[in-house]
Image (spheres, coloured by chain):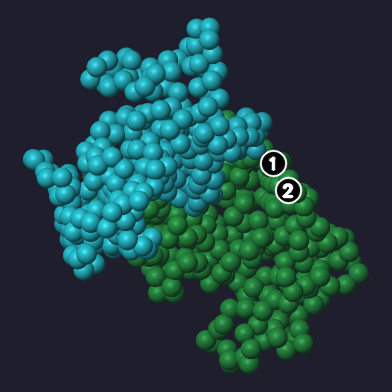
Chain colours: A cyan, B green
Amino acid sequence: MLAFILRRFLGMIAVLFAVSVLVFIIFVLVPGGDPASRMAGKNPTRENVQNIREKWGFDRPIYIQYVKMMEKAANGLLPGPHGEYDILTSFQNRQDVAAEIKKGIPATFSLCVGAGIIWLFFGTLVGIFSAITAGRFSDRLITTLALIGISMPVFWLGIVLRYFLAEKPNNPPFPDGEYVAFTVSPMQWAYHLILPWFCLSVLFIGFYGRVLRSNMLDTMNEDYVRTARAKGIAPSGVLMKHVLRNSLIPIVTLFGLDFAAVLGGGAILTETVFSLKGVGWYAAQSVGDLDLPPIMGVTLYGAFFIVTFSAIVDFLYAYLDPRVRAV
Amino acid sequence: MAERLLEVKGLKVRFATEDGTVHAVDGVDFELDRGKVLGIVGESGSGKSVTAMTILGLTRDKNTRFEGEAIYKGQNLIELSESDLRNVRGNEIAMIFQDPMTSLNPVYTVGDQIVEAIRTHEGTSKRDAKRRAVELLRQVGIPNAPHRVNDYPHQFSGGMRQRAMIAMALSCNPDVLIADEPTTALDVTIQAQILELLANLRADFDSSVILITHDLGVVAEVADEIIVMYAGRVVERGSKRQIFYDPQHPYTWGLLGSIPRLDRPKPKKLHSIEGTPPSLINLPRGCKFRPRCPHAFEKCQEEPDLQRRVEDPGHLDRCWLSVEEKRRLRDATIAGGAQVVA
């Protein structure tokens, strides 16, 4: 088991390294042209451009530029004082990218953890319910609702929810304000997040419900489920202990990866529609401004979560499915 | 006389499907006494597994229709409520399935699955149940049982898994053990071990066994009585001696003829019964074996009843041929069937 963990950890580092190289290539080398003149603004003087080139190190060899970039990225994450040029800095407003991402984390985490719990819980519930009533009216109704949920674009749903439930002039049931920190007021925190949670969960609930339903229907035909019934176990026991336990294994993978993606700044639409100033919102802003360092920063940050969570999924898999442990 | 445990009378099972009604079991009768082994033999699709699963109510579904009775200790299992039936399943009638590779849940240890069977029917503590699981595994011949009880099914070989299945089936001391093709998925040496194990355990646990197989060689080892099924019906029924030494139905001859034998000259080709079993949706008129039977004549347009046609009591069959004709024709079929058919 220890060897497994160690191997997985080394793999994580290798993947992160590969991602950082790719990010560097895509953002620094592929666009072409001189990044210094891009940064210098309109009608720069020759000295101005040269100045930037030297200070940012764009005149150095590529591998040194890469190392410098990673140093900057790491420096920003480490505490302590930093000079103007030893951190990953926005072209646009010279803000420290890592610090900006850190600022967005509370809002993003609040949104994603809450929504993650909601979609996992209701997705599972929907899946179980439609699997046991498969073919009946309730199953068809839920299937239709799930398809509607999957098909609704988040930006549309978000705006509609916001308009009808938070903005209409007479006494809207939900506040249309910004994110309120949990430490300030837990009640207000949750109250402000209900609509974004709902909006982000809807798609996943529909999707997870469909996946779990088909997993469970497949598992119900397994020989070991027949064995369980032949042992005289009550239907609820057969369902929970034998069918659900095995059907949930693929859901764990899905959840790990989806959750990592939204945590890593993937909830761009939800954050933007509800003006939650999280990491996704920051990414959207930077893309709008063609501000490369923040986009690089968010990409690395997102990659970190996806890699971390896929490792966690692997460990969970080993726990959930004994056949994996042997490998 | 031995205690009668199970009596199946006129059992019919029909499944409604999109293509039509499947007559999976179409009139099966048999009795099982305590301590006896009944062999049910037939090809795939002859209804033998459906018969067994129906006794335990495992075929119950909104698209399934039942007729007839399966009386176990005075109660009709076909009409018993689901919750009453659960007390019978695993506890009084236990079942072993064909494929030990897929019949155990891969995410629980073998011990947990046996403990679950015990605790479903008895208020035993987890500790005692576990101790009994170890003891059962030891009895079915799992080496190092106290250690192996914590293994997962994938850590067991096929033969060991089937032993574990048997241990699980015996865990509540059932009166009847239904073994549905218990050796089909195993290689031949393991087959013999499992059959021997079943035979020994039957004596130890004082259970009766219904042994379902497509292989007459398997029932030859252990069965007291044999029924041969074809297209959902019993076509011949008798003691082991009667079926093997005086088989009356051409289908039984075909089955006997398709066993390779060491005591006869080697045929050029392994004999098989020509044709395929009929569709259970559109059954042929008359005798169901008629389309494949080399000895069919006009009378076979009408379906024969299962009745005694030979002197021996207890030996029943469904064939219009006279006993003398049968005895003349069958020796040729069994000895070197291929030539006769060709």
Q: Amino acid at mark 2?
A: Thr
Chain for mark 1? B
Chain for mark 2? B
Q: Which residue is mark 2?
A: B17
Query: What percent of the width, then of the height, locates residue B189?
Result: 40, 74
In this rendering, the count of numbered labels is 2
Q: Quadrant of the N terminus of chain A?
A: bottom left
Which label belongs to residue A233?
none
Q: Is residue B248 above or below residue B112?
A: below
Question: Is residue A4 or residue A321 the one in the foreground?
Answer: A4
Q: Secondary structure at mark 2?
A: strand
Question: Is residue B95 or residue A290 the one in the foreground?
Answer: A290
Q: Quadrant of the C terminus of chain A?
A: bottom left
Question: Is residue B245 or residue A79 the one in the foreground?
Answer: A79
Question: Is residue A41 or residue A84 the one in the foreground?
Answer: A41
Query: What percent of the width, then of the height, locates residue B181?
Result: 52, 61
Is disc 2 surrounded by few (<14), some (14 to 19) or many (20+) residues within 10 Å?
few
Which label belongs to residue B63?
1
Circle 2/circle 1 CB separation < 8 Å:
yes
Query: What percent of the width, then of the height, locates residue A203?
Result: 51, 36
Residue at x 74%, y 74% (from the top left corner): B275
Residue at x 58%, y 66% (from the top left corner): B214
Residue at x 24%, y 17% (from the top left corner): A184
Which residue sits furthest top? A170
Residue at x 62%, y 85% (from the top left corner): B270
Specify whether A138 is left or right of A315.
right
Q: Secondary structure at mark 1?
A: loop
- Whichever of callouts 2 and 1 sits on the residue coming sooner in the sequence is 2
Q: Amino acid at mark 1?
A: Asn
